[in-house]
Amino acid sequence: MVAALSLFVAGCGEHDHDHDHGTAAGSGHHHGSAHGGVAVELGEHQFHLDFLHDATNGALTAWVMDAHVENFIRVSLRSLDVQIVTEGRTNAITLEAVANPATGESVGDTSMFRGTSDSLKGLTKFSGHVGPLEIRGVRLPAASFQYPAPSH
């Protein structure tokens, strides 16, 4: 808890760090995805949702991560609702909390969420919208993203 709090307080302020300050969510500060997808900043550099899409089976997975996309953040959420926009059509997908016995995570105390939808099968590019959310007592505004992330 102390380590997480110190990361929260320190933010991206005065320490040396290696990451891109472009943007995927429009805030002007961006960290790369830890899973090879798109990291979406939530709030004022407080948390990230790290999205990974599998076009073959229409799956979308999201992990709740810290401000620097380095550590998983367990949350009490049971699901995340994501709006997917492609070719002018909007589809809602619910990502359900995923338990992981190897890490001790359970539904209601996990960092991972996953859902599948036929509307995601074969997609290589789409826009997404998530939130607003509340994570660890912090109310976070809605965030939008492009998948894959635009080139800088």
Image (cartoon, helix red, strand yellow):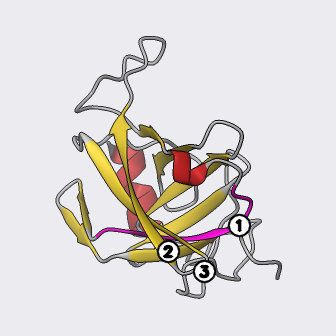
Seen in the picture, residue 41 relative to 77 is either above or below; the reply is: below
In space, the residues marked 3 and 2 are separated at their CA atoms by: 28 Å
In space, the residues marked 2 and 1 are separated at their CA atoms by: 13 Å
- Label 3 belongs to which residue? 29
Mark 1, Cα crowd under 10 Å, few <14 / some 14-19 / many 20+, is some
107 sits to left or right of 60: left
Q: Which residue is at a point 27% across and 71% down the rendered structure image?
A: 132
In space, the residues marked 3 and 1 are separated at their CA atoms by: 22 Å
Q: Identify which amino acid the numbered label 1 is placed on.
A: Lys
Q: Position of residue 35 (x, y in %)?
A: 68, 44
| Label disc, if present, on residue 84 of the rendered structure | none
91 sits to left or right of 80: right
**SS at mark 3?**
loop
Contact, CB < 8 Å: mark 3 with mark 1?
no
| Label disc, if present, on residue 125 of the rendered structure | 1
Q: Identify which amino acid the numbered label 3 is placed on.
A: His
Q: Identify which amino acid the numbered label 2 is placed on.
A: Arg
Which stretch appears magenta? 123-131
Seen in the picture, residue 125 relative to 55 is either above or below; the reply is: below
Query: In the image, is residue 128 part of the stretch drawn in magenta?
Result: yes
Q: Which residue is at a point 31% across and 68% down the rendered structure image?
A: 131
**SS at mark 2?**
strand
68 sits to left or right of 82: right
**Hey, which quadrant is residue 12 in on the image?**
bottom right
Q: Position of residue 34 (x, y in %)?
A: 67, 48
Q: Which residue is at a point 41% across and 57% down the rendered structure image?
A: 6
Q: Quadrant of the C terminus?
A: bottom right
Seen in the picture, residue 97 relative to 152 is either above or below; the reply is: above
- Label 2 belongs to which residue? 89
Mark with earlier residue (3, 1): 3
